[in-house]
């Protein structure tokens, strides 16, 4: 009865109340009604009456024509040499998301700075992330700095979500490794460092939180040597620390960079190095030069003869050593206090590699795994890409994140899942900014995009040109370390729970579930207690499932 009353009330309500935010339609005059009637009769008559049929205004009719897009000339807007595909990795609470928020603000991607502790960070878009103040899932975005395109993946720092770091590093060309200047190198710092070593990812270090009580830049540098076995190359020195942290000394330019503290750190100035730091700066400058000149015999000879090495040569050698992993540049700052982020962006552009600086991506022939194939980072090569993440969007459905290594990808086209020998149609091609989406018609080598409409592709599988297939190296996923049993409260919850578990397992390869036929329990497995806690919370929120967690029943054979 209540529903019927609602329908009757809606029918009686004026149009202005039903169409919220719209003006009420005026009552048409007699002349207008006559014109509308004549137009209607002509429309029924169709082309015979001399009228041209109008195209349907529905979204389907506005889909791009593949032939037009494919022949649209140069689809690349940024040269591949100006691409930087990077990740930000660290131990939990080292300031990854805070740093990313400043990057988005200073590059003009965001008009305000989101804060983790306020639950307003752009990259922490999940409800659980905003409530807990931690990053749970990796998020992708794109920003521009000094005419360079920087594709960024912000990764979690908690050990339970180490898979997110693993699959991000698999598709990235470089990384920023953050350290808390108070805590130094922490356990998860070592884990993500080993993951970066595994995939040969060049990286730079950023010693963060220089404004905090107990901050010590040089102790952190020593821990990088002792705990990580790395060779840090100090290219910045802090000016003060804790409450007196004012800026940094740039050893490449031999200038002090000081932030005024106004306009959220957007303004800074280059000044002479403070007198009390000049001797230290000169010592570290000499150490830096002695390290980098070893990479070029001609430069070394000139340096030993007392010649002056220009700034561009210094940057070129630092870049060469970073990409070859001869050393790791070390910078410092305080992202939360808005100091040090712009020079960090300069370092990303100057020292981290573009796709062209790295070896071609290798794969195998699907029909003969013994045959090794290569894909160069070029738009003219056959298309190849790796699906590294699956995400369920409430409006779009399943989204497949893909790193494009070669060729072009056009919305509406078909690609081959080379692992399963199945064709997939690209329904929509999306550029992601955390959880917001922007439709694009074409993506090129070096891009990181999300694809809507794929039905058979899972994390770690290769998408390629149907005529020239290739299977790229798959990812390795860690095995679960903890398990718990869950029970639905009702039969309806059981059906929804099954759907939710399947979708969550597709998103997260480190999450497993199974049904114990003897105990009649559903057992879920994950990387830790927090991991499973988030899984259960997502089942309740996203899939509206009422469930209980319980101990796993053991059965014995006597």
Image (cartoon, rainbow, N blue to C red):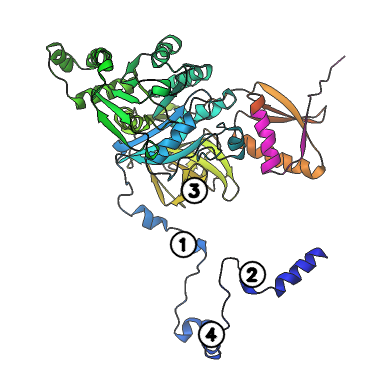
Disc nearest the viewer among 4 and 1? 4
| Among numbered discs 4 and 3, the one appearing first in the sequence | 4
Residue 545 colored in magenta in the image? yes
Quadrant location of the N terminus in the rendered image: bottom right
**Residue marked by disc 2:** 17
Q: Mark 2, residues whose alpha carbon is within 10 Å: few (<14), some, or many (≥20)?
A: few
Q: Residues within 10 Å of mark 4 (few under 14, many from 20)?
A: few
Horizontal arrangement in the rendering, residue 400 relative to residue 309 (left or right): right
> Which quadrant is home to the C terminus?
top right
> What residue does disc 1 label?
62
State if disc 3 and disc 1 touch (CB < 8 Å): no
Residue 105, x across and y down, in percent: 41, 40
Which residues, given as a range, are shown in magenta? 531-558
Please state the horizontal and vertical placement of residue 243, each as a whole percent of the image.
42, 23
Q: Is residue 524 left or right of residue 152?
A: right
**Which is more toward the observer, 159 or 509?**
159
């Amino acid at each position: 009865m209540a529903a019927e009353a609602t329908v009757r009330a809606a029918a009686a309500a004026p149009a202005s109340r039903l169409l919220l935010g719209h003006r009420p339609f005026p009552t048409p005059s007699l002349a207008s009604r006559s014109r509308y009637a004549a137009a209607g009769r002509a429309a029924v008559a169709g082309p015979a009456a001399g009228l041209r049929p109008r195209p349907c205004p529905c979204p389907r009719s506005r889909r791009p024509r593949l032939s037009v897009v494919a022949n649209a000339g140069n689809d690349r807007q940024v040269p591949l040499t100006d691409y930087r595909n990077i990740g930000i990795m660290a131990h939990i609470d080292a300031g990854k998301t805070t740093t990313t928020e400043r990057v988005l603000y200073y590059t003009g991607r965001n008009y305000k700075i989101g804060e983790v502790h306020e639950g307003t960070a752009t990259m922490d878009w999940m409800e659980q992330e905003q409530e807990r103040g931690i990053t749970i899932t990796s998020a992708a975005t794109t920003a521009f700095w000094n005419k360079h395109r920087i594709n960024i993946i912000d990764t979690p720092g908690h050990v339970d979500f180490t898979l997110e770091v693993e699959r991000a590093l698999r598709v990235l060309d470089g990384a920023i490794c953050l350290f808390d200047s108070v805590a130094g190198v922490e356990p998860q710092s070592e884990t993500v460092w080993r993951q970066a070593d595994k995939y040969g990812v060049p990286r730079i270090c950023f010693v963060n939180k220089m404004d905090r009580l107990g901050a010590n830049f040089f102790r952190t540098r020593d821990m990088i040597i002792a705990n990580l076995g790395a060779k840090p190359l100090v290219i910045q020195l802090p000016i003060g620390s804790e409450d007196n942290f004012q800026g940094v000394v740039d050893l490449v330019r031999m200038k002090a960079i000081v932030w005024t503290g106004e306009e959220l750190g957007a303004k800074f100035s280059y000044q002479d190095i403070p007198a009390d730091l000049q001797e230290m700066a000169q010592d570290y400058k000499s150490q830096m030069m002695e390290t980098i000149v070893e990479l070029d015999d001609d430069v070394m000879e000139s340096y030993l003869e007392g010649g002056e090495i220009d700034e561009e040569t210094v940057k070129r050698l630092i870049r060469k050593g970073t990409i070859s992993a001869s050393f790791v540049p070390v910078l410092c700052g305080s992202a939360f206090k808005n100091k040090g982020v712009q020079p960090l962006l300069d370092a990303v552009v100057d020292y981290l590699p573009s796709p062209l600086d790295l070896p071609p991506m290798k794969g195998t022939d699907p029909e003969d795994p013994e045959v090794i194939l290569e894909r160069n980072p070029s738009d003219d090569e056959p298309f190849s890409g790796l699906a590294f993440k699956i995400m369920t969007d409430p409006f779009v459905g399943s989204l497949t994140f893909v790193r494009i290594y070669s060729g072009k990808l056009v919305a509406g086209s078909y690609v081959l899942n080379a692992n399963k020998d199945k064709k997939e149609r690209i329904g929509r091609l999306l550029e992601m900014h955390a959880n917001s989406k922007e439709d694009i018609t074409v993506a090129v080598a070096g891009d990181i995009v999300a694809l809507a409409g794929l039905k058979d592709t899972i994390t770690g599988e290769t998408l390629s040109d149907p005529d020239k297939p290739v299977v790229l190296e798959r990812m390795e996923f860690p095995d679960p370390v903890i398990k718990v049993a869950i029970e639905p409260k009702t039969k309806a919850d059981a059906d929804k729970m099954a759907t939710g578990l399947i979708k969550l397992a597709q998103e997260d390869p480190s999450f497993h579930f199974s049904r114990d036929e003897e105990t009649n329990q559903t057992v879920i497995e994950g990387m830790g207690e927090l991991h499973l806690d988030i899984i259960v919370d997502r089942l309740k929120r996203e899939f509206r499932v009422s469930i209980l967690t319980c101990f796993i029943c053991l059965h014995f054979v006597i």
